[in-house]
Amino acid sequence: MRLIKCMGAALLLLTMSVGTANAQKHDFANWNRYAGDNAKLGAPAKGEKRVVLMGNSITDGWPRTRPEFFKDNNLIGRGIGGQTSYQFLLRFREDVINLQPKVVVINYGTNDIAENTGAYNEDLTYGNVLSMVELARYHKCKVILTSCLPAGGFSWRPAIKDSMSKIRHLNERVKAYAQANKIPYVDYFSAMVNAEGTAMNPDYANDNPGVHPNAKGYAVMESLLLPVVKKLR
């Protein structure tokens, strides 16, 4: 009996040890993705007016697809593919606040609605957006809110059939908040939706169903965003 108890205790300790080790390896927000780049940037130089773009794979793919846009306009991309607003909020200090930008551009929602980190809850997603805005404003950083892009579906979540209605409702809610709080709002959705209003215009999409923009799609986004960025700098 004593041997059995000892073996049980040893097994419990082993399980706890493995669980702790796995927890230590787990990086939900992927803070390390930009840690080296952030360290190299350091504090802004005198007169430097940084602009950080926070987002998911749409933001992540932008500087790779249109590097000249980021270089010519001195923009800093901080997008991570697959992430939701919950992960944005966790890494907002490391990838935005600590960089001391003049402006932050926040794009959100796609992966929340795709349920990448759990069931979609619009109230929680909306709250995450508001928390990022409040953090930025507290640190004297101006905010640009942008709409969630149209997406008729998600190749990795084919069971989700109502993405467009969820995107529209979230966009309307954030737009109303932006207007009420005098925050610039850039409407990518209206410029990139197809004629039927059911998905992203295929001319602007890099995949099917359209979720990620191609170079032409990014050019449309740039034409809408850049004038607002220049006004706030």
Image (spheres, rainbow, N blue to C red):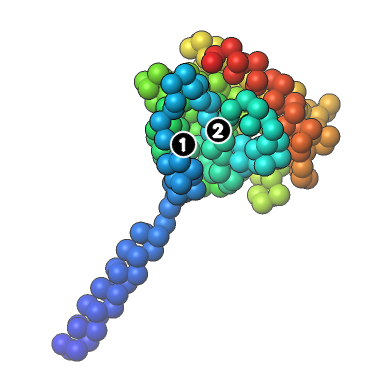
**Spot occupied by residue 16 in the image (x, y as percentages of width and height):** 29, 68
Q: Amino acid at mark 1?
A: Leu
> Which residue is found at the position 43% from the left and 21% from the top?
46
Closest to the observer, 34 or 144: 34
Q: Secondary structure at mark 1?
A: helix
* 187 horizontally vs 29: left or right: right
> Which residue is found at the position 49% from the left and 43% from the top?
37
Mark 1 crowd level (few <14, some 14–19, many ≥20, 10 Å Cα): few
Q: Amino acid at mark 2?
A: Ile
Q: Which residue is mark 1?
A: 41
Q: Which residue is mark 2?
A: 76
* 219 horizontally vs 86: left or right: right
Closest to the observer, 135 or 97: 97
**Spot occupied by residue 138 in the image (x, y as percentages of width and height):** 36, 20
**Spot occupied by residue 106 in the image (x, y as percentages of width and height):** 54, 28
Q: Are marks 2 and 1 in contact (CB under 8 Å)?
A: yes
Pair 2/1: label in front: 1
Disc 2/disc 1 C-alpha distance (Å): 10 Å
Mark 2 crowd level (few <14, some 14–19, many ≥20, 10 Å Cα): some
Give the quadrant of residue 99: top left
* Mark positioned earlier in the residue sequence (2 or 1): 1
Using the image, tell me which numbered label, if any, was put on residue 85: none
> Which residue is found at the position 38% from the left and 63% from the top?
22
Q: Secondary structure at mark 2?
A: strand
The answer to whether residue 151 is visible is: no
- Quadrant where the N terminus sits is bottom left
Using the image, determine if residue 63 lies above or below residue 17: above
Closest to the observer, 9 or 28: 28
Q: Residue furthest left?
A: 2
